[in-house]
Image (cartoon, helix red, strand yellow):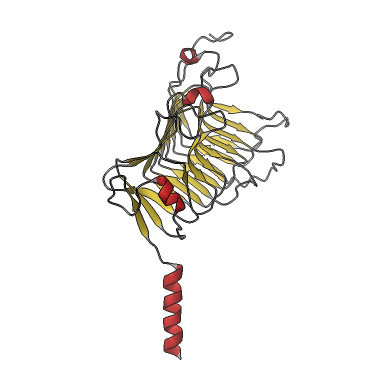
């Protein structure tokens, strides 16, 4: 009897923790050859989808499945998306929990619209790490977001970790409405700009805004630390109606001469600590900005500045 129970437990445990790895390769050497095929595969939580390094996959938006890790296999990074074609408005869509993106080169598609993004997220328990995330051709014209995290159908409260990525050539590095329970660390944000630029609109690494239901709790669940932010046009950060941020140990430097991109924005500002919805007198009450290395920021002669 006890042997039967023991065997049953072992079998049950092996089923729960079973893990399969599937390779995606355009040359036919893997289990699948396209994004569309892996989208249609019935994957299990714990599975790993490995795209072959240095091969490009751009036949469809990658629709992530719950609990699955997507990474590269081989020397280098697999390429998801195509910066020179206008096929899709989003490169990777994450609307399930437990997803990991690791060591991928993710391109936005050409001419993504104002509401487009390279990676779209509306669920947590998410890890994005070791990835190169880059906007497509002309994406700066349309306010493209590197990572867009939305509160639809409800705010994301499960943890999100975005670490050791390079995010470049888009209007906003990370755009997050109602951020909570986040670690944004050791990333490199650069070449962030928007065309045209205006006095109050431009490119930035993080655009983080809370809704009117924000409560002053001082739990500090959003930690932004050890990032390098440079070649930004308007502001390193835009933060509104938030009381739960700690921004520390970041290296912020070398803003752009925004006159190249229509002028009038970004006069050496570090952070737009403001209420972007204009509903609160206090703006980001209680958020902490400390121990950051801010240097080599310049004013470029906008009206009213010397």
Q: Give residue 237's position: percent from left, percent from top.
A: 54, 30
Q: How many marks?
A: 0
Q: Give residue 74's position: percent from left, percent from top.
A: 27, 48
User: In this view of the protein, which residue sits in the foreground, 61 or 99?
Assistant: 61
User: In this view of the protein, which residue sits in the foreground, 273 or 158?
Assistant: 158
Q: Can residue 145 be seen in this view?
A: yes
Q: Is residue 270 visible?
A: no
Q: Give residue 19's position: percent from left, percent from top.
A: 39, 63
Identify the residue at image location x=52%, y=47%.
160
Identify the residue at image location x=67%, y=32%.
283
Q: Give residue 116's position: percent from left, percent from top.
A: 53, 33
Image quadrant assignment for residue 18: bottom left
Tell me if residue 195 comes above or below residue 25 in the rendering: above
Tell me if residue 222 comes above or below residue 204 in the rendering: below
Residue that lies at the very extreme toward the bottom in this rendered image: 1
Image quadrant assignment for residue 296: top left
Q: Left or right: 85 with respect to 176? A: left
Q: Left or right: 13 with respect to 243? A: left
Identify the residue at image location x=43%, y=60%.
46
Identify the residue at image location x=45%, y=50%.
39
Q: Left or right: 280 with respect to 37? A: right
User: In this view of the protein, which residue sits in the foreground, 6 or 291?
Assistant: 6
């Amino acid at each position: 009897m006890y042997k039967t129970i023991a065997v049953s437990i072992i079998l049950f445990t092996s089923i729960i923790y079973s893990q399969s790895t599937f390779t995606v390769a355009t040359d036919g050497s893997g289990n699948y050859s396209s994004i569309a095929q892996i989208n249609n595969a019935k994957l299990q939580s714990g599975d790993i989808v490995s795209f072959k390094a240095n091969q490009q996959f751009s036949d469809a938006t990658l629709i992530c499945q719950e609990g699955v890790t997507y990474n590269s296999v081989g020397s280098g990074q697999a390429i998801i998306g195509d910066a020179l074609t206008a096929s899709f408005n989003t490169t990777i869509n994450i609307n399930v929990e437990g997803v990991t993106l690791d060591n991928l080169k993710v391109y936005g598609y050409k001419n993504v619209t104002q509401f487009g993004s390279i990676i779209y997220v509306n669920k947590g328990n998410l890890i994005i790490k070791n990835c190169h995330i880059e906007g497509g051709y002309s994406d700066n014209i349309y306010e493209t977001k590197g990572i867009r995290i939305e509160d639809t159908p409800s705010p994301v409260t499960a943890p999100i970790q975005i670490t050791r990525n390079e995010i470049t050539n888009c209007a906003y590095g990370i755009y997050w409405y109602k951020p909570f329970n986040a670690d944004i660390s050791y990333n490199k944000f650069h070449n962030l700009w928007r065309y045209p630029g205006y006095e109050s609109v431009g490119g930035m690494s993080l655009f983080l805004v809370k809704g009117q239901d924000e409560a002053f709790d001082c739990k500090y669940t959003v930690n932004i630390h050890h990032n390098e932010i440079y070649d930004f046009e308007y502001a390193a950060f835009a933060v509104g109606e938030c009381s739960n941020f700690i921004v520390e140990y970041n290296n912020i430097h070398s803003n752009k001469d925004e006159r190249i991109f229509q002028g009038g924005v970004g006069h050496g500002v570090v952070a737009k600590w403001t209420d972007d919805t204009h509903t609160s007198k206090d703006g980001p009450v209680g958020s902490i900005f400390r121990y950051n290395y801010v240097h080599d920021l310049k004013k470029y002669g906008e009206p009213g500045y010397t």
